[in-house]
């Protein structure tokens, strides 16, 4: 009788018994990915207009919509403060807007507990449009008509980015809960 | 995905309290954010130390991307150069002939200039840069046009210092960290810069419009003497910038001045130099008596109060 392939009964993470997820990874991946989203736009030189959508905020929205109950209701405070350090907005705008977002999503979820992808996209698009307008108004600079016009592509990109971000958050979630630790 | 059942509190007192506490903390956070926002709109420099420390952390990563960016630009420029190498070669040959002649003329003018300066006992004030660095990043997701610089307080950089590239003015240092600094670019809609036309005595202010162009507003209204293609340079009024550095080129005429394009685009620069404040005494004198009246004390606004100094600068 031929010998069985030793990996025949295992999945990509190894043997399927005696394995559990890493608590560190399960707890930290959402926060780290949102903070990375806040940091990425800093590395580009944008001298003419705001070119990058607010990636940190969009990642927060995606995590909140994809995994309800994972981020606590007050998560907008520390994450928004971190975003304020790098975004160029006056300190406090992120803390306020991200907290309001979390509260609004909580109330929305009490009304619509079961949602589909299109409904989530609509919610995320509406939230990112409101956030785009609020950040422009609260940026501390004079809001000129020209500024609003050149920032329009940013609003469009933030709405269109949600499906891609939702995919990324889904794969990050798989990575977050992958079996990594041997028990027993 | 539906919310997990832990969010439904039911009759459990503990679950009810934890849901209530969540709402309480989030509401308090929103109020706290509103308070911080009002504070930082009223006193923009209030959280500068925090932002400085954060900038120090991100600056090394920015150095890497800055090096990659300039490398990439050179690579694509090299490819583009092959397509029109022949005609460009001939044009450049002709241009260099003319440039050689002009250079000889400039040498003569420079010698005369030196002689006249010696006669007047004026020192030639060549600004020695405080530091040279790369622009390591910018606030690409925000409506503000701020850039991050890879040098900070430990290199002698202080807020207010002008930042120039080899082409012209890029902006002014706004806040400093230990090893990083924030630069207010000219295109930010809070940036105001006193300028004059390179040829002649037309004094104006160049304000950022927020869309990458500058609005040039003349100080003396009347018949608009500006023409498309005029080069605007710093006038030195206000004391921050040394006079005669290129700022922008007029691309459109408006009734009160013009719309101008930047000469030194920050995204196309490799290294920038931080120069000392041209006349620190003048800056201090302009800021000191105004401080109790205007709590904002934005350095950008200092140019507005300097119109008498601007005319004095031009008479000289």
Image (cartoon, rainbow, N blue to C red):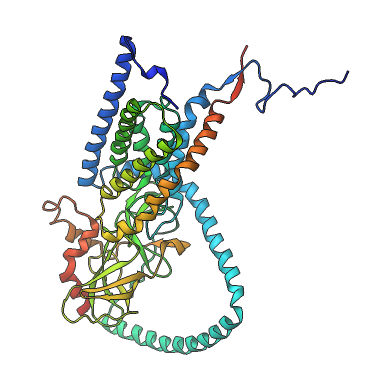
Q: Is residue B174 above or below residue A184?
A: below
Which residue corresponds to the image point at 25% horizontal and 55% vertical from the top-left?
A143
User: In front: A171, or A119?
Assistant: A119
The residue that appears at 15% across and 71% down in the rendered structure is B308
Query: How far across and down, in percent of the image, does residue A159 sit?
Result: 40, 46
The relative height of residue B10 versus residue A107 in the rendered view (above or below) is above
Q: Residue at x 41, y 17 (%)?
A: B5
B282 vs B123, nearest the viewer: B282
Tell which of B240 and B71 is nearer to you: B71
- Please indicate whether residue B302 sits to the left or right of residue B93 in the image: left
Residue B301 location (% of width, % of height)? 21, 59
- Does any portion of residue A84 appear in the rendered image? no
Residue B164 location (% of width, % of height): 38, 65
- For the N terminus of chain A, the quadrant is top right
Q: How many marks?
A: 0
User: Would you identify the image quadrant in which residue A153 lies?
Assistant: bottom left
Residue A101 falls left or right of residue B217: right
Residue, x 54% and y 83% (percent of image)? Answer: B92
Classify residue B108 by image quadrant. Answer: bottom left
| Residue closest to the eye, A95 or A60 | A60
Single out the residue that lies furthest toward the right.
A1
In the rendered image, the residue lying farthest to the left is B293
Can residue B54 be seen here?
yes
In this picture, residue B203 sits left or right of residue B245: left
Question: Could you tell me which quadrant the C terminus of chain A lies in?
Answer: top right
B235 relative to A68 in the view: left or right: left
- Where A181 falls versus A48 (above or below)? above
Q: Position of residue B16 (x, y in %)?
A: 30, 14
């Amino acid at each position: 009788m031929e010998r069985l392939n030793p990996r025949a009964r295992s999945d990509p993470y190894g043997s399927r018994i005696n394995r559990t997820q890493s608590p560190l990874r399960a707890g930290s991946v959402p926060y780290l990915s949102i903070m990375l989203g806040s940091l990425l736009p800093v590395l580009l030189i944008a001298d003419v207009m705001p070119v990058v959508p607010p990636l940190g905020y969009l990642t927060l929205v995606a995590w909140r919509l994809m995994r309800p109950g994972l981020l606590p209701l007050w998560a907008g405070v520390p994450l928004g403060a971190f975003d304020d350090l790098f975004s160029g907005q006056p300190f406090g705008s992120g803390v306020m807007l991200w907290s309001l977002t979390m509260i609004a999503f909580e109330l929305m979820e009490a009304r619509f507990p079961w949602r589909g992808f299109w409904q989530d996209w609509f919610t995320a698009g509406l939230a990112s449009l409101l956030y785009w307008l609020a950040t422009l108004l609260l940026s501390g600079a004079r809001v000129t008509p020209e500024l609003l016009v050149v920032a329009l592509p940013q609003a469009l990109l933030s709405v269109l980015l949600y499906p891609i971000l939702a995919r990324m958050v889904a794969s990050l979630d798989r990575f977050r809960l992958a079996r990594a630790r041997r028990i027993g | 995905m539906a919310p997990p059942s832990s969010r439904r509190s039911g009759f459990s007192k503990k679950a009810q309290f934890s849901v209530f506490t969540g709402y309480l903390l989030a509401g308090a956070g929103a109020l706290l954010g509103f308070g911080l926002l009002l504070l930082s709109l009223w006193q923009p420099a209030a959280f500068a130390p925090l932002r400085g420390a954060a900038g120090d952390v991100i600056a090394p990563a920015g150095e890497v991307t800055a090096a990659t960016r300039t490398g990439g630009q050179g690579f694509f420029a090299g490819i583009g150069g092959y397509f029109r190498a022949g005609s460009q070669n001939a044009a450049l040959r002709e241009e260099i002939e003319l440039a050689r002649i002009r250079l000889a003329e400039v040498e003569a003018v420079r010698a005369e200039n030196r002689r006249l300066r010696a006669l007047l006992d004026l020192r030639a004030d060549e600004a020695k840069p405080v530091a040279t660095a790369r622009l390591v990043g910018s606030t690409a997701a925000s409506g503000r046009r701020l850039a991050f610089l890879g040098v900070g307080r430990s290199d002698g950089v202080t807020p207010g210092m002008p930042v120039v590239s080899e082409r012209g003015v890029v902006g002014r240092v706004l806040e400093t960290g230990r090893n990083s600094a924030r630069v207010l670019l000219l295109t930010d809609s809070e940036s105001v810069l006193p300028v004059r036309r390179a040829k002649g005595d037309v004094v104006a202010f160049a304000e950022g419009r927020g869309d990458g162009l500058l609005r040039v507003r003349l100080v003396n209204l009347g018949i608009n003497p500006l023409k498309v293609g005029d080069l605007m340079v710093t006038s030195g009024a206000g004391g921050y910038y040394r006079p005669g550095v290129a700022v922008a080129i007029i691309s459109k005429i408006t009734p009160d001045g013009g719309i101008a394009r930047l000469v030194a685009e920050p995204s196309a620069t490799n290294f920038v130099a931080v120069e000392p404040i041209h006349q620190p005494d003048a800056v201090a004198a302009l800021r000191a008596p105004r401080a109790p009246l205007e709590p904002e004390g934005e350095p950008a606004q200092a140019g507005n109060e300097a119109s008498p100094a601007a005319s004095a600068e031009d008479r000289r």
